[in-house]
Amino acid sequence: MRFASLGSGSEGNALVVQSGRTCVLMDCGFTLAEAGVRLERLGLAADSINGIVVTHEHGDHIAGVARLARKHSIPIWMTHGTRQAQYEVLSGLPGLNEISPQHSFAIGALQVQPYAVPHDAAEPVQYVFSDGARRLGVLTDTGSSTPHIEATLSACDALVLECNHDPEMLANGDYPSSLKQRVSGRFGHLSNREAAALLARLDNRRLQHLVAAHLSRKNNTRELAVAALSAVLNCNADWIAVATQHEGLGWREIL
């Protein structure tokens, strides 16, 4: 099993997971053309995608989903709340499947486990992907952790973890106070400090890859995010990867 990021940040998000001939896209916040370019960069064609799983309805995650699915006849999975929040955009789209945050489902060779997260959206989820032997956990767009999140992400072989902001940079930055409160609130985004605290509570004995994701362009730096995570694992900073907005992240193999 392997995974890669097309891009991660407030301007667009998409993650691809592959096991054998099964290729699943998590979210697509890019235009049709941009998604195609970013997939090609990873050696993939858009028509090789077997399914799209959606986390929530915010534009940086869902803006390109309907167009990509229509053009290439790709089935989609999302919660009822997310579907209702984008009802007009998704209306009449074939292959649209509603999921429950409590129940896993299969797409080809991949088992997909959704789980609920606290975020300011209608019915947001994140996902754990498995090929039966290895597990990739993804957590972005959550304002806080929960015991359920931590139980779900324990004992993963690879983890993509939100490190959205540095609290001091956010507090002293130029965002209006209302946006600062939203970002740092319980239904906003994880800070470096919060991501590190969450990581410390997980069972990380199987961890082969750790990727910092959804970094704020204005309120964080790569160095601060990596330093927070590497301190928890007591590892070299260069062992931790960062999924960036413009370059994403190249393929990572989970052995």
Image (cartoon, grey):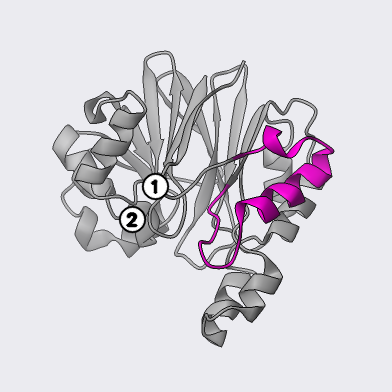
Q: Secondary structure at mark 1?
A: strand
Q: Is residue 94 left or right of residue 159?
A: left
Residue topped by disc 1: 78
Residue topped by disc 2: 83
Q: Residue at x 35, y 60 (%)?
A: 59
Q: Is residue 158 visible?
A: yes
The magenta region covers: 213-241
In this orientation, which residue lies closer to the viewer: 24 or 99? 24
In this orientation, which residue lies closer to the viewer: 10 or 85? 10
- Image quadrant where residue 7 sits: top left
Q: Are marks 1 and 2 in contact (CB under 8 Å)?
A: yes
- Label 2: few (<14), some or many (≥20) within 10 Å? many
Amino acid bearing label 2: Arg
Q: Residue at x 65, y 69 (%)?
A: 186
Q: Residue at x 26, y 60 (%)?
A: 87
Q: Is residue 201 visible?
A: no
Residue 215 painted magenta? yes
Q: Residue 156, image x and y in percent?
A: 68, 31
Residue 27 painted magenta? no
In this orientation, which residue lies closer to the viewer: 222 or 144? 222
- In three-dimensional space, the C-alpha distance between marks 1 and 2, rounded to whole angstroms, equals 7 Å
Q: Residue 140, image x and y in percent?
A: 56, 52
